[in-house]
Amino acid sequence: MAHAAKAFDKKFWQNACVAILFRHIVMSKASRMDIHAFTALVGETPRQIRFLISEGFMPPPTGGRARAQYGIEHVEAVRRYRWLRERFAPAQIKVMMTTVGNALRLPVAPGIDLLLELSLIGPGLDPARIAERVHELLADLPPSDTHDNPEPKDAADAS
């Protein structure tokens, strides 16, 4: 188990470093790539990229079919999909990604999902660890009967 955790941490940091380098050194907002440069950068085949787009795991490229251009949002989508694919089946990933923007939806308890905006939490925080911690915190909450009795009985109960 400890070996698997170390391997995961190593892979996580490798992916995080690639994303950071790509974002800050190689890629500017105006910089775009064709399918060949993009697949070489992310290490995926054009067929896999088309699959990710068709399944909604990745936004479509800009510029149309003949001059498709890929950018940082596509690199982040591939990175996010790889991370999720190590943990979940594609059908589960599809459900989790039915949110707006770059947010990732993780179930933490029955009826409770955690939305994480991956671009804001940064590479130093692991979304799985965040979801696990939220799950633990929810499990530590004492049972409450406030849904049966939403109003306190008297002023002493309110304090």
Image: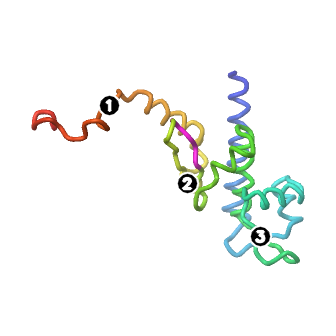
Q: Residue furthest left?
A: 155
Q: Quadrant of residue 30?
A: bottom right
- Determine the secondary structure under disc 2: strand
Badge 1 or badge 2: first in the primary sequence: 2
Badge 3 or badge 1: first in the primary sequence: 3
Left or right: 94 in relation to 159: right
Query: In the image, which disc is placed on residue 117?
Result: 2
Q: CA distance from mark 1 to mark 2?
A: 30 Å
Q: Amino acid at mark 3?
A: Pro
Residue designated by label 1: 144
Badge 2 or badge 3: first in the primary sequence: 3
Q: Amino acid at mark 1?
A: Ser
Mark 3, Cα crowd under 10 Å, few <14 / some 14-19 / many 20+, is some
Q: CA distance from mark 2 to mark 3?
A: 21 Å
Check contact, mark 2 vs mark 3: CB within 8 A: no
Q: Magenta residues: mostly which secondary structure?
A: strand
Magenta residue check for 108: yes
Query: In the image, which disc is placed on residue 61?
Result: 3
Check contact, mark 1 vs mark 2: CB within 8 A: no
Please tell me which residue is depicted at 69% across the width and 47% down the height of the picture. Answer: 93
- Residue depth check, mark 1 versus mark 2: number of the one nearer the observer: 1
Please tell me which residue is depicted at 71% across the width and 39% down the height of the picture. Answer: 88
Q: Name the image quarter holding the N terminus.
A: top right
- Determine the secondary structure under disc 1: loop
Please tell me which residue is depicted at 71% across the width and 56% down the height of the picture. Answer: 77
Q: Amino acid at mark 2?
A: Glu
Q: Which residues are magenta?
A: 105-109
Mark 2, Cα crowd under 10 Å, few <14 / some 14-19 / many 20+, is some
